[in-house]
Every structure is written in structure tokens, then in C-alpha cells.
Amino acid sequence: MNDSPFHQFSAAPRLQSRRDFLWSSGGGLGGIALASLLGQGSSLAVTPAGGVPHHPPRAKRVVQLFMAGAASHIDLFDYKPELIKRHGQPSDFGEHVEAFQNGLGPWLRPVWDFKPYGQSGKMLGEPVAELGAVVDEMTFVHNMVGKTGVHSQGTLLQTTGFNRPGFPAAGAWVSYGLGSMNENLPAFVVLPDHRGLASNGTKNWDSAFLPAQHQGTVIYPGTETPITDLFPDKRANFTTAQSEAQAHNLMSALNRTHAIQRPGDDRLEARIRSYELAARMQLAAPEALDISKEPAYIKEMYGIRDDVKEWPKDINASEEMDIFGRKCLAARRLLERGVRFVQVWSGNDNGFPRRNWDSHEDVERDHGPLARGFAKGAAALIKDLKQRGLLDDTIILWTTEFGRMPSTQGGKGRDHNPFCFTNWLCGGGIRGGVTYGPSDEFGYKPLDRRKPTECYDVHATILHLLGMDHEKLTYRAGGIDRRLTDVHGHVIEPLLA
């Protein structure tokens, strides 16, 4: 059997003759204007890799909020009165525990007080109290388990479904399966933390063996250059329209020669598509990312401060709200303009003391500003999508690579806990006001250890709501029909509205 891609969607037809005509008429990016004149049917427009869904979808788009460094479920979402009762007592897990560092000290009560919110009465920790206003839209999964306590592997598992590099991100699979809803913007967009990239860097949104046009496009909202290299460098003032057109024509000739010599290599096709998309984005992206015309009450809802001129290195709650709020507002603007999958990152700074979610030394110091920041932005995003009629067909997924231990590390910190953590979801066909899959009395492991929830199940559920069967969305690579859920996963029926 050959290694040609196998995908059980009816792919859109390719109009190669039109493309050939456009290349010969205008060449490369220079042909974009002619393509526009010839209409939207041009093959220079984005051609979706996917086609007809397997079943009627409930959702069209996804937002993944990723807390890099491992957020503590037992301090934010998973209330454990038993830890309050046993605070300071020697921890006893009833089995040998392989700790990542030395985090098997006494039991540590939740760092913050919990209160009930909404008609569901969901208990939330004080730093995420902003979510109380929308908690009845959300469903919490408290019996998530991972496969590793190593950040790089745990992060890849949640973003790609595999704990090693070389596999496409969930956003790339969605882009491949459903294609773009807007030919002028990428299908998959990534908004990293302003302090840097999380473990694995760009591998968290790579397309791997899928066609390269499905990888995530990185955007930094609020910065001078949100999209790197979208526009010519200011120093290139010697470039003229004539010289640029000549360069495009030369690139066209070189690319065509390269393609003829390498039949079946889709990397050139992806490169051509990326150049074409970049040309269209020069008009569409600045408008999509321009929040200056947003009403003041919207900015206030997201926690955005107009007086912030640059991203601070040190963080506090109001600055973190501004930073994460800008990303959430940018996500909303991208979603309503047709972006399929937006990945928003929180927390990454490998300096000391830590300024991410990896709170080995001090949970209160690290989690406090980050949690208040993301909660403000996430709550605003849910409210904003709902008031615009977009929440019904937009899935929001909050996740992290694993949880943190119920015992203390060094008095104020918590060690890694891959044995149990929390995800929450809302919108897009997800039931609201639901708590699913309880953890045990300490938040150490799932209460029913025979039936944990894994990332495969969450991914399968999201694909199902998007109209895709996770077992049928495949791509043949290395002689294997690969899929996002590997050989695992089931749709979590109790989460569906």
C-alpha cells in the first residue's frame, strides 16, 4: 500500500488549469490582484482540505485555553474539604508514589477559599471567581489523567494526542478536516504567552505529516508586529513595485521548476498557499486584530487597560488581566471572522522565581495573578460569544498538561500530579452546569480508577461536535492511518447537550 493520504471526506475539486493561467498571467503574489478580478472561484483561494462532515455538526469552531506549567485543580476548581480537615498532617497515599521532585510533604489545604456559584452551586476557588457569572454554561471534568509528569510530554499529549514529537496538533487536524471558513485568514491561529513559548515551542501547533498549510499561524495581539514578516521590513525602502513584481515572477518560475522535478511533494503546494494567504492577510489581519474601535464596555469586560504601552516582565493581577484579555478579545474577533481553531496560551517564563503555572515553590504567588488574569478574560469571552450568538456553535476547552499534588512541596508549593487533573468545556453543544468524573477525596486520582477520562476522550468529543468521527478522520503516514486520538478515545456522551 502506498503512502498517499487517506481521508474519508469528499475533497473539493482542484482547478489546476485556472492556477496555471494565474501563474502565467501574474506570477506568485503578483497574481493575487488578477485572481481577485476573476472572482472567488479562483484556485488561488484557500481550498479546504476537508469536505462534507460525517454527521450534522453542533459546532463550527474551537478555542483551546492552555495553562502552561500545570495548573492546580485542587486550588481552583476541584474542591476537597478533606484536605482542609487534614491540613498539615503527614500525607499517606496508600501506595508508593513516584514524585517528580520531592513533593510528598504534609497534606496541603486549598490555598484559597472556595464558594458556590450559579444555579449549579459549583465550588470555585477565589482567584477564578470571575467565572462564577458563567459557571452554568460550563462543564467540569475532574477525572482527567495523563501518562507522564514531564512538562514537554504532558503538553504534547494535550495538544497533539501523543506524548512525543512528530504528530499534528488538534487545531491542524480540525483545519485539515473542515478547511477554512475565511479565505483571507488562517484556519488555525495560535496566541502564545507574551513571555515566551511553552515546552516544545512550535511543536505544540505543528502540522507534522499533514499538509503544511494546516499548521498554526502565530499572532501576538497588541504588539507592534502581531504577525512576523507579514509586511516588508521598514528598512527595505529601496523596494519598488516593479522590483517586487519581478521578484514574484522569479519565485514563480523557480517554484514551478522545483515542483516539476519533485512530483508528489506537497511542501511546495503548502508554500504557495502560504504566500497567497499572506498576501490576503495583509488586508484582513490588521482589521481583525484592531481592537481600537471596540466599545469601552467591551474592553472593560475583558480587563483591557488602554494605558499599557508594553508588556511587563514582572506580573500582577491587573497586568495579567490586560494581557490575557487582549488575547481573548482577539480570539473572539478571529472566530467571528471565520477562524476555525484558536489556541490561547497562559504562563511561560523559565526564570526564577517562576512566573508560570509550574508552582513548585509558591502556589499563591504564581497561580494568583495568572488565575485572576485568565478567569477575567475567559469569562468575558464566554459572555461576549453568547451575546453575539456565537457560543452555541463555538467550543471552549480549558486545559493544562497535568495537575498538582495534594501534598506540599517546601511548605508553599505543589509537585506535579499526572494521575489526576481538571478540564472544563462550554458552548458548541456542551451541557452547562455539569460536573463529570469526580476525583477521590484528595484530588490525587480519579474516584473510579477503572474509568478515567483521557485527552483522547476530550478530543473525540470535540471532533464529534464539529461533525467528525474521530475514528474516520485519518491521514496515511509511514504506512499507518494516523488520527488525532491514536487508537483510543470515546465520545463523552454525558457532556453533550
Image (cartoon, rainbow, N blue to C red):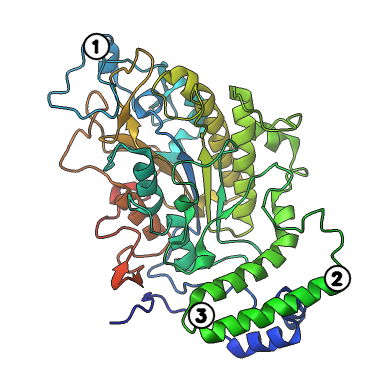
Crowding at mark 2 (Cα within 10 Å: few <14, some 14-19, many 20+):
few
Residue 480 as seen in the image, left or right of residue 392: left
Q: Earlier in the sequence, mark 1 or mark 3?
A: 3
Residue 23 as seen in the image, left or right of residue 495: right
Q: Name above or below for residue 311 compared with residue 102.
A: below
Q: Earlier in the sequence, mark 1 or mark 2?
A: 1
Q: Nearer the viewer, residue 64 or 163?
A: 163
What residue sits 37% from the left and 79% below the top?
4
Q: Disc 3 marks which residue?
A: 12
Q: Nearer the viewer, mark 3 or mark 2?
A: 2
Q: Disc 1 marks which residue?
A: 86
What residue sits 24% from the left and 11% below the top?
86
Q: Secondary structure at mark 2?
A: helix
Q: How far from the left and from the top, in percent, is residue 58?
A: 44, 59
Total of numbered circles in the picture?
3
- Going by the numbered disc 1, the residue's amino acid type is Arg
- Snapshot quadrant of residue 81: top left
Q: How far from the left and from the top, in percent, is residue 426?
A: 44, 44
**Residue 2 visible here:** yes
Q: Disc 2 marks which residue?
A: 241
What residue sits 23% from the left and 9% below the top?
89
Q: Secondary structure at mark 1?
A: loop
